């Protein structure tokens, strides 16, 4: 699968609504043309993407947006994740959500409790513990990490025996940006729009969910990185297109995991 970056929609994604990846090179600009985003680059024909077909937008680097285009994304419920040149998350744009409000109400009630923040932190810790144990089993089965048990914090390993290189760190940073876009889409789907997220401060739901989603891909990413390091055939995840292709190939798994996490969060807060 080939994932495109210069204003080209990934036509390989299943379903009606698809992700749009934009990379701020060669004067890439986005404006609004009726019900569609118009992507322009010097000396190239404009490309149009109907908002009704977009699930999310990842805008990396110096993409030039007009206010009308950003407002149209917000009004259409298409979250935009802004990434820096290295793939790190700079910010988000959310619009109104058409999802229900059950999770929002539970989170608001949680924040009113004296132990609300601790309760939320306990849920995150429990989810990380479950995911870490599953990852350890997966890695040991393929012989990637036969040594001491990994200590993971998000996607970055810590402890005396890290298993990643500087190249892997760049891969993980880009991966986190891609997952942030998925996290934003999941939260909009769950009924958490910009106004509701503002009422849930100091919770950082987008980043927290993106960190947890990383566990669904940590195994495949780490395994492919080890193979690449040994000179074995396989994708070069240092290539942004190949990393994005890996994420998109496993998007169904990531979204299932994300919906499961949010369902467990709601159930956790009901107790």
Image (tube, rainbow, N blue to C red):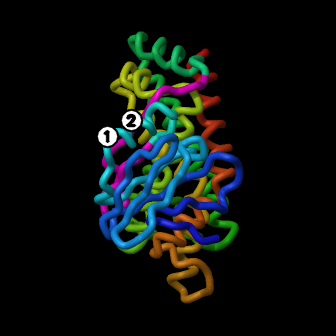
Quarter of the image with the N terminus is bottom right
Q: Which residue is mark 2?
A: 71
Residue 46 in view of the camera: yes
Q: Is residue 86 magenta?
A: yes
Category of crowding for the residue at label 1, using alpha-carbon neighbours closer than 10 angstroms: few (below 14), some (14–19), many (at least 20): few
**Which of the pair 13/224 is nearer the observer?**
13
Image spot of residue 186 (x, y percent): 56, 38
- Front residue of this view, candidates 169 and 188: 188
Residue at the spot 53% in from the left edge and 27% down from the top edge = 97
Secondary structure state at the residue bearing disc 1? helix
Labelled pair 2, 1 in contact (Cβ < 8 Å)? yes
Evaluate whether residue 184 shows in this view: no
* Looking at the image, residue 149 lies above or below residue 203: below
Residue 240 appears left or right of 217: left
Magenta segment includes 153: no
Q: Residue at position x 70%, y 54% from top? A: 14
Residue at point 60% right, 25% down? 99
All told, the count of numbered labels is 2
Q: Residues within 10 Å of mark 2 (few under 14, many from 20)?
A: some
Q: Is residue 142 above or below residue 156?
A: below
Determine the residue positioned at 46% across, 47% down. Answer: 180
Q: Residue 152: x and y, percent?
A: 46, 54
Q: Which residue is more in the foreground, 268 or 50?
A: 50
Which residue range is magenta in the image? 80-99
Give residue 67's mark.
1
Work out which quarter of the rendered image holds the C terminus and state it.
Answer: top right
Tell me the number on the disc at residue 271. Answer: none
Q: Where is residue 84 drawn, in percent x and y?
A: 31, 57
Kindly report the distance in space between the C-alpha atoms of the residues bearing marks 2 and 1. 6 Å
Find numbered disc 2 in the image and state the secondary structure of the residue it sits on. Answer: helix
> Percent x, y for residue 68?
36, 39
Most extreme residue toward the bottom, as rendered? 231
């Amino acid at each position: 699968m080939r994932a495109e970056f210069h204003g080209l929609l990934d036509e390989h994604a299943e379903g009606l609504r698809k992700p749009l990846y934009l990379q701020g090179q060669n004067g890439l600009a986005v404006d609004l043309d009726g019900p569609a985003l118009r992507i322009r680059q010097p000396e190239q024909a404009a490309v149009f993407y109907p908002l009704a077909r977009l699930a999310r937008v990842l805008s990396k680097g110096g993409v030039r947006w007009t206010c009308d285009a950003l407002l149209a994304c917000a009004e259409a419920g298409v979250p935009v994740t802004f990434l820096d040149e290295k793939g790190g998350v700079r910010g988000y744009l959310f619009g109104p959500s058409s999802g229900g409000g059950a999770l929002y109400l539970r989170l608001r009630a949680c924040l009113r409790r004296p132990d609300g923040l601790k309760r939320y932190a306990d849920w995150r810790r429990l989810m990380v513990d479950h995911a870490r144990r599953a990852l350890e089993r997966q890695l040991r089965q393929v012989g990637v990490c036969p040594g001491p048990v990994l200590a993971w914090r998000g996607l970055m390993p810590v402890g005396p025996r890290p298993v990643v290189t500087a190249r892997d760190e760049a891969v993980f940073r880009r991966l986190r940006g891609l997952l942030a876009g998925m996290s934003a889409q999941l939260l909009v789907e769950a009924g958490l729009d910009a106004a509701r997220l503002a009422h849930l401060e100091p919770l950082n739901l987008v980043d927290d969910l993106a960190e947890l989603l990383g566990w669904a891909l940590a195994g495949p990413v780490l395994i492919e990185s080890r193979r690449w390091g040994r000179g074995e055939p396989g994708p070069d995840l240092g290539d942004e297109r190949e990393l994005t292709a890996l994420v998109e190939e496993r998007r169904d798994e990531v979204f299932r995991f994300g919906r499961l996490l949010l369902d467990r969060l709601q159930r956790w807060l009901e107790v």
